Amino acid sequence: MARFETRYRARKIAIQLSIAAAALCALHVIAMCIYWSDIEDSWDFDLRWTHVSIFDLDTEESFGTWLATMMLMFSSRLLFLQARAVKKAGAPRWWSRYWWILGLGFAWLSVDEVAGMHEWVNAHTEELWTGYGLIVASVVGIAFIPFLWNLPGRTQALFILSGLIYLGGALGVEHVNDFAKTLEYNLWNTLEEGMEMYGVILFIYALLTHMAGGPRTALWKTTVVER
């Protein structure tokens, strides 16, 4: 039987993820500006999209998509751990179910980040997927009002703020950024994807501090027994 302990420092993780997200946003801007400029005329090789696509935040096969997927999966994992902890603490069953549903939601978002399932709507209807996404987000938001109401004030505020930032990028900026593939389109993507990543980072920070008992004790740890 092996026993090991996992520790998460909320502030440290948030800072590290923020730096990584900022670096990827900067690389996206640099790569797009180079690709859409005439600088390649002075180079010895023909600059193709495959040379810069790994830095494109709007492409599934990129570093940005990898980071976003990992953060969403990390959020899902933390939510499942919180749901289990709440259940073990003897809280009402409905309370743990909210955490479980949130965990499943973040797991689905992580899959969609890579698989791009929301693009199916654009391919099969004349409307942008963001309209349907807004309806789904509104229904979920209303359904989770009792959950938010029972959270501590600080956690409640940070959860709501992180959700607004994420949805502002995923639905708001995505909706107005209906351009053809141009430099302008790709620069708008920096704002869209950046808001999504920082919304998730803020959520992770808020969730970890909540699990730890507050910002002053924002070191959350769990002991895992491996049989």
Image (cartoon, rainbow, N blue to C red):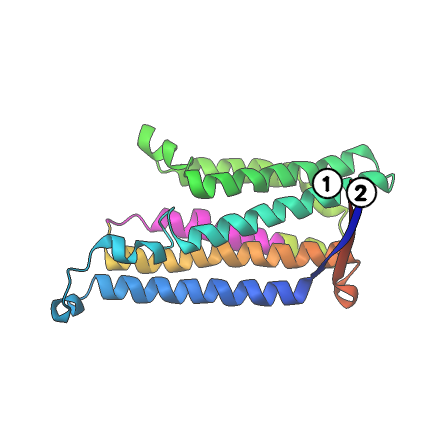
Residue 81 picture quarter: top right
**Foreground pick, 227 / 172:** 227
Q: Which residue is mark 2?
A: 86
Residue 183 picture quarter: bottom left
Can you say which quadrant of the picture contains the N terminus?
A: top right
Residues packed near mark 1 inside 10 Å, few (<14), some (14 to 19) or many (20 plus): few
Figure label count: 2
**Foreground pick, 92 / 117:** 117
Q: Residue furthest top?
A: 124
Residue 14 location (% of width, % of height) = 61, 63
Q: Residue furthest left?
A: 41
What's the residue type where badge 2 is placed? Val
Can residue 194 be found in the magenta stretch?
A: no
What's the residue type where badge 1 is placed? Pro
Residue at figure coordinates x 61%, y 41% from the top left: 141
Residue 70 location (% of width, % of height) = 53, 50
Tell me which secondary structure the magenta stretch mostly adopts.
helix
Can you say which quadrant of the picture contains the C terminus?
A: top right
| 170 is higher (above) or lower (below) than 218 | above
Q: CA distance from mark 2 to mark 1?
A: 16 Å
Q: Which residue is mark 1?
A: 146
Numbered disc 2: secondary structure: helix
| 28 is higher (above) or lower (below) than 129 | below
Residue 27 picture quarter: bottom left
Q: Which residues are magenta?
A: 160-180
Q: Residue furthest right?
A: 90
Relative side of 82 to 112, left or right: right
Residue 125 appears anywhere in the view? no
Mark sitting on residue 136: none
